[in-house]
Image (cartoon, grey):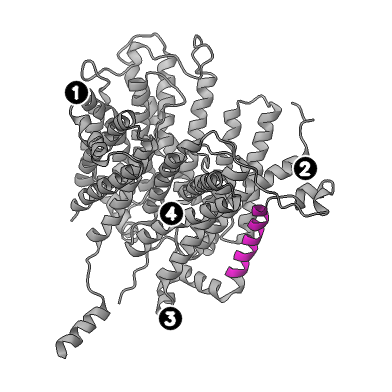
């Protein structure tokens, strides 16, 4: 094994790049689930966000337009899910799966002319003075603005859920939609808003993959990250900062296995590539094993359809 | 209304599909004809219906049983891959040995491996309460990587110039062809048998009753003395076993060897097939034929109309959306809202 190639600062930066898409997707899904809706379409919304961001950046030359397009694309796909599950009251599990299958196909179709083209560089938001410091500079002060946005998003969602009236209402809808409806909150409208927010976040997470992390478009490039984001929400017990931590743990696993591959460990690369998926399973098992605690943390109305009788 | 839903969904998908094709700059009517009609007009395409329909039908029948009970096995694709690996490895282990027992042994190995792969999420759900959707899905990626590792490693063809593929199976390890001159193999008969057996299990056996009861009223099922663990284990093992068998058929039939490109998403499309067939074995049979048609027609449209390959998956995804959307009309009845009733009453009084 060749250890000299390992640069701790470079690894830490790679970790941040690997974790950020997961932060966006997981935080978005966390809000959706807090409102009592289980959207299994994260993978589909992410990949559509990835191609929307990439394509709009290519066509307009502006990465800001790209990120905005990804946000809207994710929200549009989520709007479809919201219409199906909230208005037509279709099964949430099946509809989420449909969203993923549809999104993967749609992205592959739109993305066909874009494969193999490198993405234009994503501007870094280097903070003058601080970003040139050794070690701390590249680690803390020289990232693209989406990394900082993911931090702000996590803090914002934490504040919203735990410190604001809107968050209280959102949680009430997720814990007991009949009671929330009885005291006059519009369950369907609140849930729809949460679903759209989740879709927008997933879209941006996908865009981060194709515009910053890769940075190019490859068919099926999300490679299960949307599903891992769903697992992170369970791991986090529906708490925003724990979801942030979870995203970094999963990002760390994927970076670790990539570095092991690069060092030429005498294991076939495919077995190392399995680790993020296997770790997800192990983590799910550990977190879910305590049934009483798992039930206490999960929103009580998660996945249950709401119908305003009368 | 039960069967009008799927038919209406197919019709809506065709209409929106035509809009999609028009947006892509293709002649919409012509494209729809190529997808839904032309495959039926020649012998080869008709035989290909059996080739593509067989794995879809086998997998979807198993999934439908589980979905009835609220057991969400989403990882059929992984069980399909593991079935191909195990069946293929069993065939390669006795390479060049002739014998009528080779194929049954391969099928047994494939089905057992698929069932075992599906039992992982089942046991983790029962024992540790872990979500079977996420676990079974993660195992799809693991299975795909495992197949890729095996064909670049221990199962690689020793005379294959380092290409990542296994030896081509010898004659005794290849499925007999059903219709001379085509790729249609005896697996189609197994799929038919699975449909019949599933129908008996579902409609004429207590097992099917327990499945339906757990799906519709889990509390009542528990009071009635049915054990949830057994229902979960059995439905996961059955669907995994059928998916594994489909994987073995695919390897020992149309593909003829183990290659990384063996899985083409039948395990995921089968989810659509199960819903299109209304989770009913007979319906699944019809639905798998229709879905196979879109696969073959889609290939035709790719060649003739230069339609992007992914357009067909968009088309299939749309179908699932419309199906789920149509369900609202079979489960609920449209009624005027109370406000409108009140207004009408006022109007009548005035």
Looking at the image, residue B93 sits to the left or right of residue B207; the answer is right
* Mark 3 and mark 1: Cα distance apart in space: 65 Å
Membership of B189 in magenta stretch:
no
Residue occupied by mark 4: A77
Helix, strand, or loop for circle 2? helix
Question: Would you identify the image quadrant in which residue B308 lies?
Answer: top left
Helix, strand, or loop for circle 3? loop
Q: How crowded is mark 4: few (under 14 residues within 10 Å), some or many (20 or more)?
A: many
* Mark 4 and mark 3: Cα distance apart in space: 31 Å
* Mark 2 and mark 1: Cα distance apart in space: 63 Å
* Mark 4 and mark 1: Cα distance apart in space: 40 Å
Image position, residue A18 (x, y; %)? 63, 44
Nearer-N-terminus badge (4/2): 2
At x 25% / y 23%, what residue is drawn? B186
The reply to whether label 4 and label 2 mark residues of one chain is yes
Image position, residue B239 (x, y; %)? 35, 39
Question: Would you identify the image quadrant in which residue A267 lies?
Answer: top right
- Mark 3–mark 2 CB contact (< 8 Å): no
Q: How crowded is mark 2: few (under 14 residues within 10 Å), some or many (20 or more)?
A: some
The residue nearer to you, when weighing B284 against B231, is: B284
Image position, residue A274 (x, y; %)? 56, 35
| Front: mark 4 or 3 | 4
Find the magenta span and give its range.
Answer: A145-161
At x 38% / y 27%, what residue is drawn? B110
Question: Would you identify the image quadrant in which residue B115 lies?
Answer: top left
Residue occupied by mark 1: B43
The reply to whether label 3 and label 1 mark residues of one chain is no
Residue occupied by mark 3: A183
């Amino acid at each position: 094994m060749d250890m000299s190639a390992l640069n701790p600062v470079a690894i830490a930066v790679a970790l941040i790049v690997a974790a950020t898409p997961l932060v966006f997707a997981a935080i978005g899904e966390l809000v959706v689930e807090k409102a009592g809706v289980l959207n299994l379409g994260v993978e589909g919304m992410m990949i559509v966000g990835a191609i929307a961001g990439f394509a709009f950046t290519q066509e307009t030359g502006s990465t800001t337009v790209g990120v905005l397009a990804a946000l809207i694309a994710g929200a549009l796909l989520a709007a479809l899910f919201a219409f199906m599950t909230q208005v037509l009251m279709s099964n949430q599990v099946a509809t989420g799966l449909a969203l993923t299958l549809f999104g993967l196909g749609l992205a592959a179709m739109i993305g066909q002319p874009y494969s193999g083209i490198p993405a234009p560089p994503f501007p870094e938001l280097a903070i003058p003075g601080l970003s040139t410091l050794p070690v701390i500079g590249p680690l803390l002060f020289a990232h693209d603005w989406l990394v900082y946005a993911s931090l702000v998003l996590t803090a914002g969602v934490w504040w919203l859920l735990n410190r604001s009236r809107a968050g209280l209402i959102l949680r009430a809808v997720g814990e007991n939609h009949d009671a929330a409806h009885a005291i006059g909150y519009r369950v369907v409208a609140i849930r729809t808003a949460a679903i759209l927010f989740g879709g927008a976040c997933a879209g941006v997470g996908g865009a981060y993959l194709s515009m910053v992390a890769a940075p190019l478009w490859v068919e099926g490039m999300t490679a299960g990250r949307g599903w891992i984001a769903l697992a992170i929400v369970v791991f986090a017990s529906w708490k925003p900062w724990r979801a942030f931590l979870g995203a970094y743990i999963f990002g760390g696993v994927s970076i670790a296995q990539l570095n092991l591959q690069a060092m030429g460990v005498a294991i076939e690369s495919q077995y190392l590539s399995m680790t993020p998926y296997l770790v997800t399973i192990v983590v799910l098992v550990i977190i879910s094993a305590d049934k009483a605690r798992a039930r206490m943390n999960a929103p009580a109305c998660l996945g249950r359809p709401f119908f305003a009788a009368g | 209304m039960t069967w009008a839903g799927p038919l209406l969904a197919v019709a809506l998908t065709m209409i929106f599909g035509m809009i999609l094709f028009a947006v892509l700059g293709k002649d919409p009517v012509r494209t729809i004809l190529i997808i839904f009609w032309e495959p039926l007009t020649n012998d080869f395409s008709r035989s290909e219906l059996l080739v593509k329909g067989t794995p879809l039908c086998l997998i979807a029948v198993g999934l439908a049983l589980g979905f009835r009970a609220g057991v969400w096995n989403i990882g059929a694709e992984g069980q399909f891959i593991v079935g191909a690996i195990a069946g293929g490895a069993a065939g390669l282990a006795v390479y060049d040995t002739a014998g009528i027992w080779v194929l049954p042994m391969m099928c047994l190995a494939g089905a057992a491996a698929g069932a075992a792969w599906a039992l992982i999420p089942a046991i983790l759900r029962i024992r540790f309460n872990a979500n079977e959707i996420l676990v079974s899905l993660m195992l799809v990626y693991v299975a795909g990587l495992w197949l890729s590792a095996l064909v670049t490693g221990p199962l690689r063809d020793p005379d294959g110039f380092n290409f990542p593929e296994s030896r081509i199976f010898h004659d005794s390890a290849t499925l007999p062809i059903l219709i001379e001159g085509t790729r249609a193999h005896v697996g189609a008969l197994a799929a038919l048998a699975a449909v019949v057996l599933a129908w008996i299990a579902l409609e004429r056996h207590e097992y099917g009753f327990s499945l339906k009861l757990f799906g519709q009223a889990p509390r009542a099922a528990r009071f009635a003395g049915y054990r949830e663990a057994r229902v979960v284990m059995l439905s996961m093992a059955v669907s995994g076993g059928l998916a594994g068998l489909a994987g073995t058929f695919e390897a020992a039939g149309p593909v003829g060897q183990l290659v990384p490109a063996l899985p083409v998403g039948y395990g995921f499309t089968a989810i659509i097939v199960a819903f299109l067939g209304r989770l009913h074995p007979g319906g699944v049979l019809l639905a798998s034929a229709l879905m196979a048609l879109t696969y073959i027609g889609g290939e035709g449209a790719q060649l003739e109309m230069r339609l992007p390959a992914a357009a067909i998956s968009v088309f299939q995804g749309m179908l699932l959306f419309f199906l789920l959307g149509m369900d609202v009309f079979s489960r609920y009845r449209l009624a005027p809202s109370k406000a409108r009733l009140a207004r009408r009453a006022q109007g009548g009084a005035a």
